[in-house]
Amino acid sequence: KSEFNSGEVKIAPISDWVSNLQRPLVISGPCSAETEEQVMQTCQQLAATGKVDVLRAGIWKPRTRPNNFEGVGTIGLEWLKKAKEATGLMTAVEVANKQHVEEALKHGVDILWIGARTTVNPFSVQEIADALQDVDVPVLIKNPINADLELWLGAIERISGAGITKLGAIHRGFAKYGETKYRNAPQWQLPIELKRRLPDLPMICDPSHICGNRELIAEVSQQAMDLNYTGLIIESHINPDKALSDAKQQVVPERLAQIINELVLRDGYS
Ligand code: PEP
Ligand code: MN
């Protein structure tokens, strides 16, 4: 088994790319941008809680089965820009190829993330890395949908290889066949091992995609805090049950604030 040389991955402190870093860093917003009104209202309500640092929204959606909502595309980037101007929240979107990277950067998106269905594919990750040469933007890398630590590390190495130092990992759970309590089992041992190999890497938990339903989100968020995670990425929507994707797991902004407020933050959190 090849031991990954973590010394080769340079990681900037998160305070280099998030100002007034809160405890925890909170990224929230809809699974998918659907309409300008939905993006703007969600963002305004999130900003009003004072608990959220970054607005997230999917623009191009990788759907498991065809004939589902596949995202609004580039127009959604205009809505994010307006929401950012109105509230001052930073913005984050998922990118899966070179065109996504170029469009997102052109529209002033602050943070890019690589989704679980893209991290599994070294060709796609390398294409994204190539598009990021000479760009200074934070990139968050979700774990691959399968429990393969080397694939997760490999994606981080590829993005690092493009010269990106503003890096973070998103733990979104791992797919398992059959019905389980979770949509994607957390398998905490994988992110713990990743953190052992890359101690400076900010870890962000995505309880929404782990749980698959909104009832479990507070419990998994607390577990992430107990493990000293840096942040949380939690899906929120002004009308979750009517969401065009991931309806069961989204929460209203008010509930998001309550989940964050009720977290017990233990000593030694970093
Ligand atoms: C998402 O964040 O909406 C998403 C598609 O997540 P994942 O890549 O983790 O499935
Ligand atoms: Mn989603």
Image: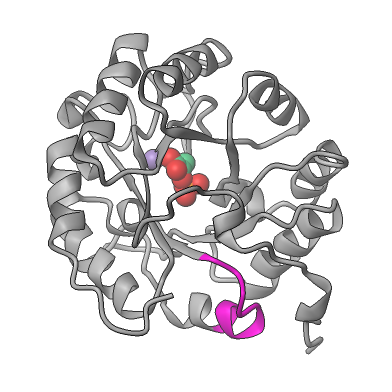
Residue at coordinates 36% horizontally, 24% vertically from top-left?
87
Any part of residue 191 in sight: yes
Horizontal and vertical percent for residue 96? 66, 37
* Left or right of residue 92: residue 201: right
- Asked if residue 201 is among those painted magenta in the image, a careful observer would answer yes
Q: Nearer the viewer, residue 263 or 75?
A: 263
Whether residue 155 appears in magenta in the rendering, the answer is no
Question: Where does the N terminus fall, quadrant-wise?
Answer: bottom right
Q: Can you give x and y, in whole percent of width and height, for residue 49 in the image?
A: 20, 39
Between 56 and 83, the one lying in front of the other is 83
Of residues 257 and 173, which is closer to you in this image? 257
The location of residue 89, given as percent across then percent down, is: 41, 33
Q: Quadrant of residue 13?
A: bottom right
- Residue 68, by quadrant, is top left
Which residue is pictured at 21% across the width and 32% down the height?
48
Q: Which residues are magenta?
A: 193-202
* Residue at figure coordinates x 41%, y 65% from the top left: 176
